[in-house]
Every structure is written in C-alpha cells, then in structure tokens.
Amino acid sequence: MPLLTVESIAVGIGAGYLVGVYLLDIDAVYLWHNMSSTQDRGLNIGLTKSMVFGGIIAIIGCYKGMNCGEGAEGVGAGPDRSVVIHPSPS
C-alpha cells in the first residue's frame, strides 16, 4: 500500500505540474516552489494512512483466509467474506 501511495502522489504532483504550467500558464519555478513547500506534510500523512490501512487489510485477509471452510466452496468463499460481511441466518 505505501508503494501504491507514493506512486499515486508522484503521478498527482506530475499531473498538477503539467496542468499548471502548460494549460494554466503558471510560471514553472513559482509553481514548483509552492508545490514543494506543501509536499512534506501531505506525503507523511498519506504514507501513515496507507500503512495503517494496508495493515488492516492484511490482518483481515489473513484471518479470513486461515478460518475459511473446508473444500473448494470454503476456499472460494474466503476472499468474499474478507470484503463483504454476510448476515448470519437466524
């Protein structure tokens, strides 16, 4: 998850730079200076959140995978149960 987040942030910064410079005619040095001053805080917050959510996803996936039912039906239902909570029959 953190690698995906870093890639997404880099693409977002690059796209914002291209749009700002080439479509909105903002001076490149001015734009880069203002973008780089706000980058650090956003990068730290984004990476922290991605590590927390990635850990949650990994823990739930491992728990549901280790506790799936027997046979092909149980193995097939394991991934489904890790993302969808089905109500138990009464």
Image: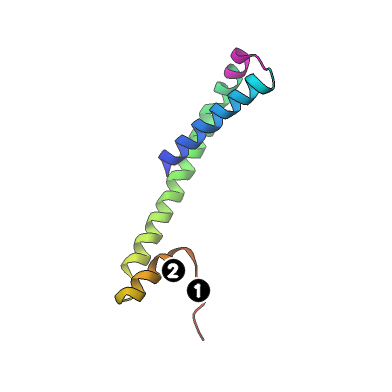
User: Separation of disc 2 and disc 1 at Cα?
Assistant: 7 Å
Q: Which stretch appears magenta?
A: 26-32
Q: Amino acid at mark 2?
A: Arg
The residue carrying mark 1 is 86
**Mark 1 belongs to which amino acid?**
His
Where is 12 relative to 66, above or below? above
Whichever of callouts 2 and 1 sits on the residue coming sooner in the sequence is 2
Q: Which residue is mark 2?
A: 81
Q: For numbered disc 1, what is the local secondary structure? A: loop
Q: Of helix, strand and loop, which mostly describes the magenta segment? A: helix
Q: Residue at x 53, y 31 (%)?
A: 41
The extreme bottom residue here reads: 90
Q: What residue is drawn where x is 41% and y is 39%?
A: 3
Question: Where residue 15 appears, x then y in whole percent?
Answer: 57, 29
Residue 51 on image: x %, y %: 42, 45
Nearer the observer, 66 or 52: 66
